[in-house]
Amino acid sequence: MECTVSWTGATTGMRSGMGFVAETGSGHIVNMDGAPDEKNPANGGRNQAPRPMEMLLAGAGGCTAYDVVLILKRGRHDVKGCSVQLTSERAETDPKVFTKIHMQFTVSGKNLPAGAVERAIAMSHDKYCSATIMLGHTAEITTGFEIVEA
């Protein structure tokens, strides 16, 4: 797996320039930007794209949601939808790693057994989701779920 991240630099006429563009090995482009810095605008972003740490959190959510759907489908459950809302806390000092992450899943489908959903989430977090397993080294990760009949 590879990725190239390039600083877009301070664009002429702009107050700040902390934007980055990532090109993934699969050929996709993702923009990232820093938060504006009122005290020193040249060191801040323009709030035009997600922050890099937001992308990391989103990647973890995508990784685990992918696992949950795949595990349920492989178990021949009639899953129709899956979303995960992530909330997090970070350390107050550098490096500002994630210290707590909560993942609240909403899984929809027809006659989905709660035990199967709970098992799929546990399997993702214990065995399959590289992102959450890696983040679990610095963050306490908790989960919850609800099932919506669809």
Image (cartoon, grey):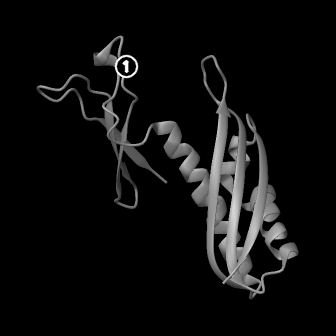
60 left or right, relative to 121: left
The quarter of the picture where residue 69 lies is bottom right
Which residue carries the number 1 mark?
Answer: 37
- Check the image and name the residue furthest to the right: 115
Q: Which residue is depicted at the point 69% across and 42% down?
A: 135
**Looking at the image, which is closer to me, 27 or 104?**
104
Amino acid type, mark 1: Asp
Query: Residue shown at 12%/25% (left/top)?
Result: 13
- Residue 145, by quadrant, is bottom right
- Left or right of 123: which side holds 129? left
* Residue 73 seen in the figure: no
18 relative to 54, above or below? above
Side of 1 relative to 23 (left or right): right
Give x and y (percent) for residue 77: 74, 86
Hey, which residue is sitting farthest top in the picture? 39
Place of residue 143 in the rendered image (x, y in percent of width and height, measured from the top left):
78, 54
Q: Position of residue 146 (x, y in %)?
A: 76, 67
Crowd class of label 1 (few under 14; some 14 to 19; many from 20; radius 10 Å) = few
| Camera-nearest residue between 78 and 136 | 78
Q: Quadrant of residue 11?
A: top left
Number of marks = 1
Q: Position of residue 128 (x, y in %)?
A: 72, 61
Q: Secondary structure at mark 1?
A: loop
Q: Can residue 70 be seen at all in this image of the molecule?
A: yes
Image-based side of 9 in relation to 82, left or right: left
Nearer to me, 4 or 84: 84
In the rendered image of this protein, does residue 30 appear above or below residue 120?
Answer: above
Q: In percent of the image, x 66 and y 84: which residue is there?
A: 150
| Residue drawn at x 61%, y 51% as measured from the top left | 60
